[in-house]
Amino acid sequence: MTDNAPTTTPGAELVIRRPDDWHVHLRDGAVLDAVAPFTSAHFGRAIIMPNLVPPVVMAADAAGYRARILAAVPAGHDFTPLMTLYLTEATDPDDVAAAARDGLVTAVKLYPAGATTNSASGVRDVRAVDAVLERMAAIGLPLLIHGEATDPEIDIFDREAVFIDRVLIPLRQRHPGLRVVLEHVTTVDAVDYVRSVEAGLAATITVHHLVINRNAVFRGGLRPHYFCLPVAKRERHRLALRAAATSGDPRFFLGTDTAPHPVTAKESACGCAGIFTAPVALACLAHVFEAEGALDRFEGFASRHGPAFYGLPVNDARTRLVRDAAPYTPPAPVLARDDAIAVFDPEFPLHWRVADTQPT
Ligand code: DOR
Ligand code: ZN
């Protein structure tokens, strides 16, 4: 990797408000049971992606999924799942408004149809959901966007930038009051666009996009465990993401997009997109902030900017991260029944770890 060597002395520690993860895939069934504890161990709240099969479309689906998530969280973990609905062209604005009023959902997710894993029921023509977006703007419910254009003519590395020009800018012009999160941004184009907007627009950034560029997917052979969507871009884009994440700008906050798939589904002729980062997300993030000389801004990115955007309080609990002098062994794959799920390997030695969480 091209990271600068960390500069903090061994034994350093960092105490921050308990972080939240503003973009998580927890799946369902045995995988949910296997992966949820890694998120609930380190994060107070998480925005839960609705791309199950079938997707979480109706308020009642979200209520059932929320109960299954809570059942998978170990006793003693203080964790609140923040539910989302999967926007389709048949979504009823009244159902969305009722779910928001009841406090059942925190946001609605827009997947362009065909953009990524389980997005077949997503939106083909974004104008078909204008009535839902209008209602969301009126009640202040945020829209979370997977920002990739899906026209097969468009080069995969250009999909985010094209989406901003062709879909996002017109959408925000039609709905100026709508609060929008452009999720898992991967390009300097997205960073510049978010910075150009005064209010009502924010972006999440994943840990892996701060660590890898697109070479990681191809170095020495095809490496499916570094494949995700949006796909990692050139080095100059990664550097722009690192600058944005460590800048202290409240428009950027953490959304890991931790996305578990069985190893057998990743190591395949048509491998699934998604990187399972939850067990090492904070450890890798502390490494990145340390390398950038920005540990004083870690708390903003991981714990403060997200709640500020959503109008929620910062978590009361404190998380202590420590930097051990000796690197530790990366976590082994997680097992969901017979399926192994590989944990993200940042290809740098791990020194930071989450030591403990204090209630206040
Ligand atoms: O890499 C990804 N994996 N990107 C997504 O947008 C979806 C996710 C998944 O669900 O696996
Ligand atoms: Zn995702």
Image (cartoon, rainbow, N blue to C red):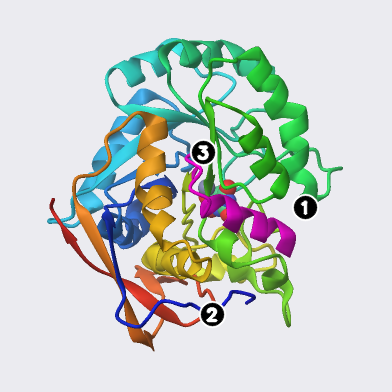
The kind of residue on which mark 1 rests is Phe
In this view, the mark in front (1 or 3): 3
Is disc 1 surrounded by few (<14), some (14 to 19) or many (20+) residues within 10 Å? some
Q: Residue at x 53, y 25 (%)?
A: 199
- Quadrant in which residue 61 is drawn: top left
**Residue sitting nearer the eye, 268 or 327:** 327
- Residue with the mark numbered 3: 251
**Mark 1 near ligand 1 (CB under 8 Å)?**
no
Give the left or right position of residue 342, taking residue 113 as reference.
left
Report the disc number at residue 144.
Answer: none
| Percent position of residue 210, x then y | 57, 61
Look at the numbered disc 2 and give the secondary structure of its residue.
loop
Q: Over which residues does the magenta segment extend?
A: 235-252
The secondary element bearing badge 1 is classed as helix
Secondary structure under tag 3 reads loop
Q: Quadrant of the N terminus?
A: bottom right
- Left or right? Give the position of 252 relative to 120: left
User: What residue would you read off at disc 1?
Assistant: 157
Cα–Cα gap, marks 1 and 3: 24 Å
| Residue under label 2 | 5
Check the image and name the residue furthest to the bottom: 326
- Position of residue 250 relative to residue 57, above or below, is below
